């Protein structure tokens, strides 16, 4: 089945809802290589360098215009909330979030930083970091990062370093681990009082446009599953998303009111794009404030002006916990790096391999790979890749 870009962004997050946890990704070196257009590609534009900020200009030949530094700052200065989207495993996204924060610091703009990655019950740890009682190196253990978030801390380190450099206080925005999923199952009435206290009252419902998008994503993911006995239903899926969006918006509004600073929100794309998630709830909680939507853009097509206010160009990468990094280029997945001593290296996967199939499923996108990985995990089976290596075709078996 064909999947649009919005659907692909949600699929990995949805898999976490099903499995109840996050996979830890290894941190290969950041690749700044930009995909190039080909005669078979949908791209007709000249792509900017990786890490360039742009705005969507549909009437221009490329569909975007590069932002001058002052224009970027001017837009940021007039916002109470700066929603900086990301794909959690994409190091380029985090580097650009940190770059955005650094530009504000260099211009003398004082902000607070809100983190999806940290739950509100761990705010005392961030308070210690803000006060200089904890170092960056001590944060992963103090936050129990591996278990509470799961994505490699080194991906987020530039954000913490920038916050420390410019004296930006950090604030937790998210619900305690597992609580959103529990709320999705039993509702607010089914939670004990100590857990119910973490949920905002009320949880603001999803707008119709977000419901429609979530329904598409739900159907796409369900089509991947063979056994749906334990899968959530659509209402539960939407309730969970609403709980996350409302909680983070509520906490961000509280931080803005208490600090009198703009709040930069470091958060996954699904909570930012089109203003459906956090921004929609902020319109209810802080109706006169402006939210600036800053989104990654992958270059497969011109940026959608409705999806965000500002975009930064970063190729779409995926960091696998098995030790390799993929880039989606021209309807194919390319191996960018393979981490030393990782399962991928031991299996014989090599840099510049192009994945053709995974367990006999043709691979043209990260969504295809997601489908193959879910099936392999469900069957407790290894991933068998058929890869193109130069002029040869090679099978590589990666044990989980």
Image: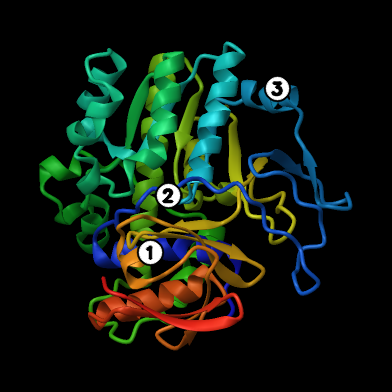
Discs 2, 1 touching: Cβ within 8 Å: no
Residue 348 is situated, as x and y percent measured from the top left of the image, at 38, 71
Mark 2 vs mark 3: which is more N-terminal?
Answer: 2
Discs 1, 3 touching: Cβ within 8 Å: no
The answer to which quarter of the image holds residue 68 is: top right
Q: Secondary structure at mark 2?
A: loop
Residue 237 is situated, as x and y percent measured from the top left of the image, at 36, 64
- Per the image, the residue denoted by label 1 is 14
- Per the image, the residue denoted by label 2 is 28
The answer to which quarter of the image holds residue 182 is: bottom left
Q: Secondary structure at mark 1?
A: helix
Mark sitting on residue 74: 3
Mark 2 vs mark 1: which is more N-terminal?
Answer: 1
Mark 1 vs mark 3: which is more N-terminal?
Answer: 1
Quadrant where the N terminus is found in the figure: bottom right
Quadrant where the C terminus is found in the figure: bottom left
Residue in view at x 28 percent, y 49 percent: 150
Q: Which is nearer the eye, 265 or 153?
A: 153
Q: Secondary structure at mark 3?
A: helix
Which is more foreground, mark 2 or mark 3? 2
Tell me the CA gap for discs 2 and 3. Answer: 34 Å
Q: How many marks?
A: 3
Mark sitting on residue 198: none
Residue in view at x 63 percent, y 26 percent: 76
Tell me the CA gap for discs 2 and 1. Answer: 24 Å
Specify few, some or many for label 2: CA neighbours under 10 Å numbering under 14, 14-19, or 20 or more.
Answer: some
The answer to which quarter of the image holds residue 154 is: top left
Residue in view at x 82 percent, y 62 percent: 44
Residue, far front? 391
């Amino acid at each position: 089945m064909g999947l649009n870009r919005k659907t692909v962004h949600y699929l990995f997050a949805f898999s976490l809802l099903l499995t109840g946890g996050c996979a830890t990704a290894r941190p290969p070196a950041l690749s700044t290589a930009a995909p190039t257009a080909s005669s078979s590609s949908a791209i007709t534009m000249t792509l900017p360098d990786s890490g360039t900020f742009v705005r969507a200009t549909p009437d221009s030949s490329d569909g975007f215009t590069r932002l001058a530094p002052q224009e970027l700052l001017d837009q940021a200065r007039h916002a109470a909330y700066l929603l900086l989207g990301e794909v959690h495993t994409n190091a380029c996204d985090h580097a650009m979030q940190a770059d955005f924060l650094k530009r504000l610091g260099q211009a003398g703009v004082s902000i607070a930083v809100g983190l999806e990655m940290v739950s509100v019950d761990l705010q005392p740890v961030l308070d210690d970091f803000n006060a200089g009682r904890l170092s960056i190196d001590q944060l992963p253990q103090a936050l129990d990062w591996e278990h509470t978030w799961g994505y490699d801390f080194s991906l987020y380190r530039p954000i913490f370093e920038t916050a420390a450099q410019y004296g930006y206080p950090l604030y937790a925005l998210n619900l305690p681990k597992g609580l959103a999923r529990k709320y999705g199952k039993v509702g607010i009435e089914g939670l004990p009082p100590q857990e119910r206290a973490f949920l905002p009252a009320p949880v603001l419902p999803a707008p119709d446009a977000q419901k429609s998008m979530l329904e598409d994503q739900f159907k796409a993911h369900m089509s991947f599953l063979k056994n749906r006995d334990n899968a959530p239903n659509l209402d539960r899926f939407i309730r969970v998303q609403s709980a996350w969006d409302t909680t983070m918006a509520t906490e961000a509004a509280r931080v803005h009111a208490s600090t009198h600073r703009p709040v930069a929100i470091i958060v996954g794309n699904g909570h930012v794009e089109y203003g459906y998630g956090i921004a929609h709830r902020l319109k209810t909680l802080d109706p006169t404030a402006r939210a600036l939507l800053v989104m990654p853009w992958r270059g497969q097509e011109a940026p959608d002006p409705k999806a965000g206010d500002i975009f930064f160009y970063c190729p779409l990468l995926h960091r696998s916990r098995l030790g390799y990094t993929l880039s989606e280029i021209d309807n194919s997945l390319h191996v960018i790096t393979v981490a030393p001593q990782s399962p991928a290296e031991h299996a014989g996967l090599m840099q510049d391999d192009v994945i053709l199939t995974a367990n006999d499923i043709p691979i043209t996108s990260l969504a295809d790979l997601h489908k193959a990985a879910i099936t392999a995990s469900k069957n407790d089976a290894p991933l068998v890749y058929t890869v193109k290596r130069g002029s040869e075709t090679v099978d590589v078996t990666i044990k989980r």
